């Protein structure tokens, strides 16, 4: 009986240590940030917006993220309901994600993104503001 209790305590301690170690292995979604490569983009139906996903702990670009949520709207101009489709296009630079969209009006456009980062448990979310110029 005494050996059984010792074994149970040892097993519980091992499981607790493993759980704590795994939880520290993951970064929090707040440890990542989307950054615009250029805050001004020429308006039009083929406007290109490029963002970099950065691990703020190291400053390194994250190259294998899967972008699965995008939304572009004019919330900065008070017109959140004015949204436009966004299409991901190939990028030549690792850690840089490129998108084609229709920025039909000059002014501020909010670009919201959601991504899964390899090895991370939670979704990374962020937003940037793009200024459409003539």
Image (spheres, rainbow, N blue to C red):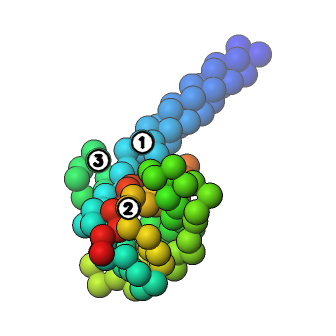
Front one among 112 and 56:
112
Q: Tags 3 and 1 in contact by the CB under 8 Å rule? A: yes
Q: Which mark is residue 49?
A: none
Q: Which badge, 3 or 2, is on the more N-terminal residue?
A: 3
Residue furthest to the top in view is 2
Residue tagged by mark 1? 30
**Up/down of 33 relative to 48, above or below:** above
Q: Residue 113: image x %, image y %?
A: 49, 60
Q: CA distance from mark 3 to mark 2?
A: 29 Å
Q: Tags 2 and 1 in contact by the CB under 8 Å rule? A: no
Q: Quadrant of the C terminus?
A: bottom left
Residue tagged by mark 3? 56
Q: Residue 128: image x %, image y %?
A: 39, 55
Front one among 87 and 24:
87
Q: In the image, is 123 to the left or to the right of 126?
A: right
Of labels 3 and 2, the one closer to you: 2
């Amino acid at each position: 009986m005494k050996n059984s209790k010792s074994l149970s305590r040892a097993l519980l301690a091992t499981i607790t240590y493993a759980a704590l170690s795994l939880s520290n292995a993951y970064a929090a979604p707040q440890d990542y940030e989307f950054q615009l490569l250029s805050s001004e983009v020429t308006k039009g139906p083929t406007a290109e917006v490029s963002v970099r996903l950065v691990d703020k702990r190291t400053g390194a670009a994250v190259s294998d993220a899967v972008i699965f949520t995008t939304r572009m709207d004019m919330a900065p101009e008070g017109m959140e309901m004015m949204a436009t489709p966004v299409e991901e296009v190939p990028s030549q630079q690792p850690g840089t994600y490129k998108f084609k969209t229709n920025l039909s009006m000059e002014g501020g456009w909010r670009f919201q993104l959601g991504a899964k980062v390899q090895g991370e448990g939670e979704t990374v979310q962020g937003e940037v503001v793009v200024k459409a110029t003539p």
